């Protein structure tokens, strides 16, 4: 999927006259992963990124050997970034008073 999106973006930019030979897009990442990648560029000890905005999300670096269903996907570093997309959790999870208070002042009432 990522490669298709990147190819479409590059083609659209070329149609707009942008020289994608020199300035092409190589990958797309969401804000949470981009935050973690940027932090780790400067300091490899950063292990978690959290976004708190109109929505929330987190990602973290995990040891692949701690994730049983990914044993066949061992990376050379032995680590993998896990993007939680916690904003998409089920509505069946019980809310705390803190959750209700935060939702009450949210611009996305009933969605946080």
Image (cartoon, rainbow, N blue to C red):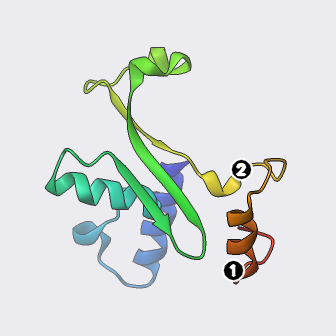
Let me know if residue 29 appears in the view. no
**Which residue: 69% across, 80% down?**
106
Task: State how far apart marks 1 and 2 are (Cα).
Answer: 17 Å
State whether residue 16 is above or below residue 22. below
Q: Position of residue 62 (x, y in %)?
A: 39, 33
**Which residue: 78% across, 77% down?**
109
Q: What label does residue 89 carry, if any? A: 2
How crowded pointer 1 is (Cα within 10 Å; few <14, some 14-19, many 20+) is rated as: some
How many numbered tags mark residues here?
2
State whether residue 56 is above or below residue 103. above
C-beta proximity under 8 Å, tags 1 and 2 = no
Dot 1: element? loop
Mark whose residue sits in front, 1 or 2: 1
Between 5 and 107, the one nearer to me in the picture: 107
State whether residue 43 is above or below residue 18. above
Dot 2: element? loop
Task: Farthest residue to the left: give it.
Answer: 42
State whether residue 112 is above or below residue 44. below
Residue 55 relative to residue 91: left or right: left
Where, by quadrant of the figure, is residue 69 drawn?
Answer: top right
Q: Position of residue 40 (x, y in %)?
A: 23, 51
**Which residue: 55% across, 46% down?**
84
Where, by quadrant of the figure, is residue 44 drawn?
Answer: top left
Q: Position of residue 20 (x, y in %)?
A: 31, 71
How crowded pointer 2 is (Cα within 10 Å; few <14, some 14-19, many 20+) is rated as: few
Between 74 and 15, the one nearer to me in the picture: 74
Quarter of the image for the C terminus: give it: bottom right
Between 83 and 46, the one nearer to me in the picture: 46
**Which residue: 74% across, 57% down?**
96
- Residue position marked by numbered label 1 in the rendering: 106
In primary-sequence order, the first of circles 1 and 2 is 2
Let me know if residue 97 appears in the view. yes
């Amino acid at each position: 999927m990522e490669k298709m999106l990147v190819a479409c973006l590059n083609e659209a930019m070329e149609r707009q006259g942008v020289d994608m030979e020199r300035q092409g897009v190589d990958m797309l990442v969401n804000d949470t992963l981009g935050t973690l990648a940027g932090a780790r560029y400067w300091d490899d000890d950063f292990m978690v990124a959290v976004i708190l905005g109109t929505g929330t999300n987190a990602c973290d670096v995990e040891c692949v050997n701690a994730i049983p269903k990914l044993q066949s996907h061992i990376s050379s570093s032995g680590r993998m970034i896990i993007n939680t997309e916690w904003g998409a959790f089920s509505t069946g999870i019980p809310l705390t008073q803190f959750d209700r208070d935060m939702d009450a002042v949210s611009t996305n009432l009933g969605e946080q």
